[in-house]
Amino acid sequence: SKVSKAKPPAPKKAAETKSLKTVKSTGLSAQVYDIHGKVTGKTILSKEIFGQKPNKSLLSQAMHIYFTNSATHLAHTKTRGEVRGGGRKPWKQKGTGNARAGSKRSPLWVGGGQVFSPRYRDVKLSLPTKMKKKALISALSTKAQNGEIKVIANFEKIEPKTKIMVTLLKKIEITNPVLIITTKDNKNIKLASRNIQKTSIDTPNNLNAYQVLQNRNILISKEALEKFI
């Protein structure tokens, strides 16, 4: 009797092999949800933006600059050269029994000038454009590696109701603070999320590293993925 040999499996097509290799090598995939919180599939995130090795030193430098620029130094006191009075010597140098005094504006006198006290200053640090871009990519890559990026399909079509947005966030297990990224300034999304604490909305062109890192989760509309940088 003849022994039937099993046929070898057909080789995979080149396109399928290439796509599988891409997913395996980068591992950059994010769940895609609809506006009702149901999973509709997965999408591949761009390796150039979401798959880079985070530069921690650059992120630290960027955070320092954003914190410094957001701080205000409005307190301002007067030195002995700015307070009023002190045009003449309070009393003669000798013979009165008092300590020597030359001006009422001395810091030793009540109403005199202040020493080492706060002064108004305008501190603005800057980061080169290329470094800003790399810092943003590092921040987005960090979020992607931690699985804190989720994609919403047809996000712009959501109804302008807070209850619907809260339900969506609960179903996809999103906790605040959350950053919502859309292609443009969408009125429905703004109305639906404005009463939810620690929820912000922005577009890809306005993002910065600090904004990405200060939010625990990031929701991106599927259309906005093509608009990054």
Image (tube, rainbow, N blue to C red):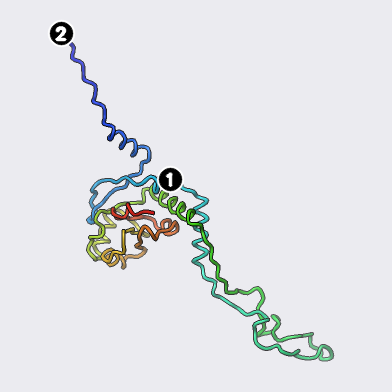
The residue indicated by pointer 2 is: 1
Q: Is residue 5 above or below residue 13?
A: above
Q: Nearer the viewer, mark 1 or mark 2?
A: 1
Q: Is the C terminus in the top left, top right, bottom left or bottom right quadrant?
A: bottom left
User: Regarding mark 2 in the picture, which secondary structure is present there?
Assistant: loop
Q: Position of residue 63 (x, y in %)?
A: 49, 58
Depicted 162 relative to depicted 130: above or below: below
Residue ID for mark 1: 52
**Residue 84 pos. (x, y %):** 65, 87
Task: Please state which amino acid type lies under the numbered disc 2.
Answer: Ser
184 vs 101, nearest the viewer: 184
Displayed quadrant of residue 108: bottom right
Viewer can see residue 145: no
Spot occupied by residue 127 in the image (x, y as percentages of width and height): 51, 58
Classify mark 1: residues with Cα within 10 Å, few (<14), some (14-19) or many (20+).
some
**Marks 1 and 2, Cα distance to the nearest angstrom?**
60 Å
Residue 200 vertical placement versus 148 (above, below): below
Q: Residue at x 35, y 60 (%)?
A: 203
Question: Residue visible at 50% across and 63% down?
Answer: 67
Tell me whether the residue at label 1 lies in contact with that at label 2, contact meaning CB atoms closer than 8 angstroms: no
Q: Residues within 10 Å of mark 2 (few under 14, many from 20)?
A: few
Looking at the rendered structure, the kind of residue marked 1 is: Gln
Judge from the rendering whether residue 55 lies leftward or rightward of residue 149; answer left or right.
right
Residue 7 location, quadrant: top left
| Helix, strand or loop for disc 1 | loop
Label 1 vs 2, first from the N-terminus: 2
Residue 142: x percent and y percent?
42, 49
Along the horizontal axis of the image, is 126 left or right of 140? right
- Taking the image as shown, residue 185 lies to the left or right of residue 102, namely left
